Amino acid sequence: MTNQTMLSLVVSAIFFAAGSSSVARAAEQAQQSKEESKSASHSMTGCVDEQNGRYVLTNDSDLTLIAILEADGFPTEAFAKHMGHKVTVRGTEIPGGTQPTFKVRSIAAVSDMCAPSPQKQQQISE
């Protein structure tokens, strides 16, 4: 082998090794990002209502606002079939804004009814 050929092989090996470690780092970072996004996802349970033209999740005991609901991966109109029902929504909370906003990836029915507990209603009427 000539010195020129040997030098070309060494340089090629260095570039190959550098490229392989960059690919490995990128794959590791992508996996870490995927795990972080999964951990940021959580669920909330409450009642679906509509306020000021937006779908919201309210507390089932006193119907106070928990979060504004935003559909993620399905049409917003899908919330309509859950109006007045107790549900569990899964997704991520969107930081910022004056009111909490929850980006919903999935929604599951818990109960067909959603109303303040009788004890709370009694306190309100007294």
Image: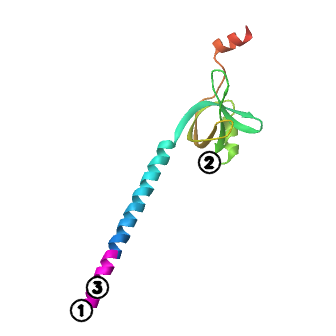
The outermost residue toward the bottom is 2
In terms of secondary structure, where does tag 1 sit?
loop
Where residue 60 appears, as percent x and y from the top left, is 63, 24
- Quadrant including the N terminus: bottom left
Q: Residues within 10 Å of mark 3 (few under 14, many from 20)?
A: few
In terms of secondary structure, where does tag 3 sit?
helix
Where residue 43 appears, as percent x and y from the top left, is 54, 36
For mark 2, what is the residue?
Answer: 72
- The residues tagged by marks 3 and 1 sit, at their Cα atoms, a distance apart of 9 Å
Question: Which image quadrant for residue 18?
Answer: bottom left
Residue type at tag 3 = Leu
CB under 8 Å between callouts 2 and 3?
no
Residue at left offset 61%, top offset 41%: 95
For mark 1, what is the residue?
Answer: 2
Q: Residues within 10 Å of mark 1 (few under 14, many from 20)?
A: few
The outermost residue toward the right is 52
For mark 3, what is the residue?
Answer: 7
Q: Is residue 6 magenta?
A: yes
Residue at left offset 69%, top offset 45%: 76
Range of magenta residues: 3-14
- Marks 2 and 1, the one that precedes in the sequence: 1
Where residue 33 appears, as percent x and y from the top left, is 46, 52
CB under 8 Å between callouts 2 and 1?
no
Residue 17, relative to residue 27: is it above or below? Answer: below
Residue type at tag 1 = Thr
